[in-house]
Image (spheres, rainbow, N blue to C red):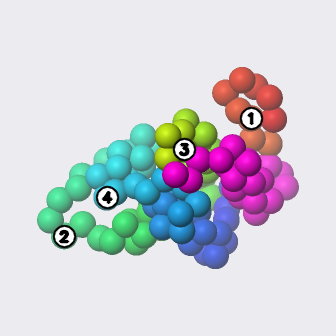
Amino acid sequence: MKISERTIKRLGEIITGDKALSPYRSRPKLVTFFNEFGINHTYGQGFPSRWTFAEDCIRQFNDTPTLKKIILSAVDPRDFMGTTVYDSGVSTAMLSWMVSRIPKPHREIRSDSGRN
């Protein structure tokens, strides 16, 4: 699946938590988030800004099957629980918005329970 540059920026904002739409992720938490998808980054001296790192990682996975997994993980309700931004409606709305930007042949996204 391939997403536009504009969608990369919006997904980056969701993953970093910069627009208060999702929980804030520090640089080390962003490294952990993206390393779950096969990247082997470490946090240390000279690490880029959070948004730059997130967008670069998304670009690396753009036009790959892994991008779908990143989108699902970015809006996983378990990460929102206990935060000031938790609202199941917001999480559902973000997922719907992201899915609407996915090209139609790639739109089938299933939850862990197997339901759409």
Gap between marks 3 and 4 measured at Cα: 18 Å
Does dot 2 land on a helix, a strand or a loop?
loop
- Please report whichever mark, 3 or 2, sits nearer to the chain's N-terminal start: 2
Check disc 1 and report its element: helix, strand or loop: loop
Q: Estimate the spatial distance between the alpha carbons at disc 3 and disc 1, rounded to whole Å.
A: 19 Å
Q: Nearer the viewer, residue 40 or 23?
A: 23
In magenta segment, residue 85: yes
The disc labelled 2 sits on which kind of residue? Gly
The answer to whether residue 37 shows anywhere in this view is yes
Asked whether, in this view, residue 100 is left or right of residue 1, the answer is right
Would you name the residue on which mark 2 appears? Answer: 46
Picture quadrant of residue 108: top right
Q: Secondary structure at mark 3?
A: loop
Q: Which residue is mark 1?
A: 110
Q: Amino acid at mark 1?
A: Arg
Residue occupied by mark 4: 27
Q: What residue appears at the point 46 percent right and 43 percent down from the top-left corner?
A: 37
Tag 3 residue:
80
Badge 4 marks a residue whose secondary structure is helix
Residue range highlighted in magenta:
84-107
